[in-house]
Amino acid sequence: MKKLLLITAFALVATACQQPKTAEGDSTLQLTYSNLVDAPTQQQVREALVEAGVSATNVDAFLESVNLFNQTVGNKAGLAPKGFTTINGLQPKYDEVAIQKKWMDKYQTFQGYNCRLTSFTLLRDLVGFNADTKLNKEEDEVLFIDRESLNNAPKKYFTAQEENNFFTLFTEVPTTNTKEMEAHLQRLQQVWKERGIEFRYKGDPAKASLISVVFHSQLSPEENFLFVGHVGVLVPFEGKLLFVEKLAFQEPYQAIIFANRTELSDYLMNRYDVEWNQPTAIPFIMENDALLEGYRPNPYKEKSN
């Protein structure tokens, strides 16, 4: 029963990108983004990633998966056709029904790549692990869709050890029944340290970092877990910041330009901090293994209510 509850709870988190968009279409807010459809923009992003310390081999693997997705879903899915485009609001609109149909027509068993698989593809060389850490498969059952995707992918990007590292990083973390974010932050930091997780470029603003949106899930008052529900890669870009993400298995890749980390926080919390009166803590955002500088609760939630 516990296994079933875990799968149900975290399957919802795994698709959290499909939650309501609370500041969609707000003309006072703007978002500048690309879906990496054209070669010149891909080259821009490639150069920014490599300059920030990401392996060129890993960037090429990432772009290969980008092209696989974009070529599969075609040009009628609502993707930005070239370069960066600026819209009112914080959420681009895509034809999710068309995307899913086109994807399933070609891949019946391969779900595609999600945010976690995409970010790990890029940063797997920049996160250190204790090679002796072996998690029981029962412990990472909440990542069952990620595991299926790895098993059914048309091309294998990870070695066996890298797959183990992936689950070491993203497997859920037991926590306490509290709405205090600081307690959950300390708990996640403690467990990551116990698992031997270290970020090579921690604290270096010129280098790539992992941006994780952490959710508190409660199966019962006695069973509480922390889970990385969304994740992306942040790098410097032309005097600003570039956030690279895959929204969900069958949703697009995005590269978004932000002026600062508070703008990044507002974008992410607008998408994920959308619940009212829940028994759990609101999501929080980490940069590598520390709280994101500029993090704050969703400033648009009250307006949407």
Image (tube, helix red, strand yellow):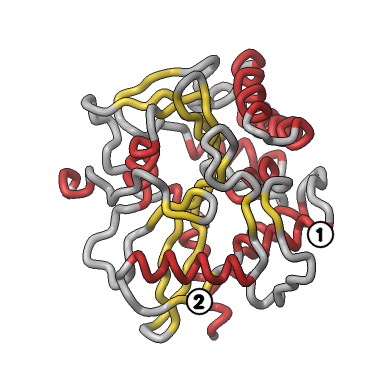
Q: Amino acid at mark 1?
A: Gln
Quadrant of the rendered image containing residue 277 = bottom left
Q: Is residue 190 left or right of residue 194?
A: left
Q: Position of residue 19 (x, y in %)?
A: 38, 50
Q: Residue at x 51, y 65 (%)?
A: 189
Q: Is residue 187 above or below residue 14?
A: below
Visible residue check, residue 10: yes
Q: Is residue 1 above or below residue 6?
A: below
Q: Position of residue 98 (x, y in %)?
A: 53, 35
Q: Is residue 76 left or right of residue 156?
A: left
Label disc, if present, on residue 174 of the rendered structure: 2
Visible residue check, residue 9: no
Q: Is residue 289 above or below residue 219?
A: above
Quadrant of the rendered image containing residue 106 = top right
- State the SS at label 2: strand
Q: Position of residue 256 (x, y in %)?
A: 47, 29
* Rendered-image quadrant of the N terminus: bottom right
Q: Residue at x 66, y 16 (%)?
A: 39
Kindly report the distance in space between the C-alpha atoms of the residues bearing marks 1 and 2: 24 Å
Q: Amino acid at mark 2?
A: Pro
Identify the residue under disc 1.
161
Q: Position of residue 90 (x, y in %)?
A: 34, 33
Q: Residue at x 61, y 44 (%)?
A: 201
- How many numbered marks are there? 2
Q: Nearer the viewer, residue 136 or 182?
A: 182
- Sequence-wise first label, 1 or 2: 1
Task: Please rate how many residues cluster around mark 1, counting C-alpha atoms within 10 Å: few if below 14, some from 14 to 19, many from 20.
Answer: few
Q: Residue at x 43, y 64 (%)?
A: 185
